[in-house]
Image (cartoon, rainbow, N blue to C red):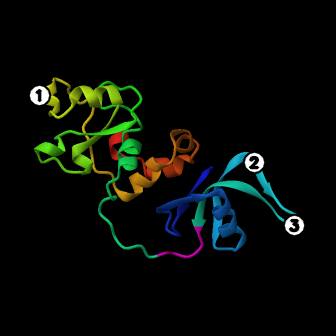
Amino acid sequence: MRDTLVLNASFEPLSTVSLHRAVVLVLHGKAVVEHAHPGLRVRAAAVELPVPRVIRLCRYVRVPFRRHAPWSRRGVLARDQHRCAYCGRRASTVDHVVPRSQGGADSWLNTVASCAADNHRKADRTPEEAGMPLLFQPFVPTPADAMLLALRAGERSELPEWLTDRWAPAAAA
């Protein structure tokens, strides 16, 4: 299912919604299409509109301030772009830099994406103990970074330049 990025009236990323939800928001006049899939259209008996990639709400929605995005395994995999922090291959698991048995926490700075083989090889040791240096350092994404990282890589590359330049994740640069 295609994800559509929802921007606040101030152009801040808020969330991603399904294509169906995005079309409903546009048809009800609650959002406008800021960027659409080229050449794709949604048609109904009396309505035709472009398939939205990015929509912007017409009214500003006040969102409680969050300094950090909430930690999740899915978020760690998205942050690291599904690349293993030890070998660079495709990652399918999350590894704790400092193992939980040694007091490591489920946090952005203590977890990295890892392939199953490297996760098993590292086992219950720190990267130094296992002789497996990290290819990149984990970081804490902002909520806006996390929102853009949640989109699949292909979808991020199709976003308009003004959006990706403004909200590009700091570590991806």
Structural distance between the alpha carbons of marks 2 and 3: 17 Å
Mark 1 or 3, nearer chain start: 3
Residue name at image x 84 percent, y 62 percent: 44
Frontmost of labels 1 and 3 is 1
The residue carrying pointer 2 sits among few (fewer than 14), some (14 to 19) or many (20 or more) residues within 10 Å by Cα, namely few
Direction from residue 46 to residue 24 in the image, left or right? left
Q: Is residue 35 depicted above or below 136 in this figure?
A: below
Q: Mark 1 points at which residue?
A: 129
Disc with the residue nearer the chain's start (1 vs 2): 2
Magenta region, residue range: 57-61
Q: Quadrant of residue 17?
A: bottom right
Of 19 and 92, the residue lying toward us: 92
Horizontal and vertical percent position of residue 143: 37, 58
Residue 6 included in the magenta stretch of the image: no
Per the image, label 2 sits on a secondary structure element best described as strand
Name the image quarter holding the C terminus.
top left
Residue where numbered disc 3 is placed: 46
Residue occupying the point 44% across, 52% down = 166
Q: Which dot marks residue 40?
A: 2
Give the residue displayed 46% in from the left and 49% down from the top. 150
Residue type beneath disc 2: Leu
Spot occupied by residue 79 in the image (x, y as percentages of width and height) = 37, 44
Q: Which sits in the foreground, 92 or 25?
A: 92
Callout 3 crowding tier (Cα within 10 Å): few <14, some 14–19, many ≥20: few
Q: Quick one: SS at disc 3?
A: loop
Q: Check disc 1: other Cα within 10 Å, few if <14, some if 14-19, many if 20+.
A: few
Q: Main secondary structure of the magenta part?
A: loop
Inter-mark Cα distance, 1 to 2: 53 Å
Confirm whether residue 94 shows in the render. yes
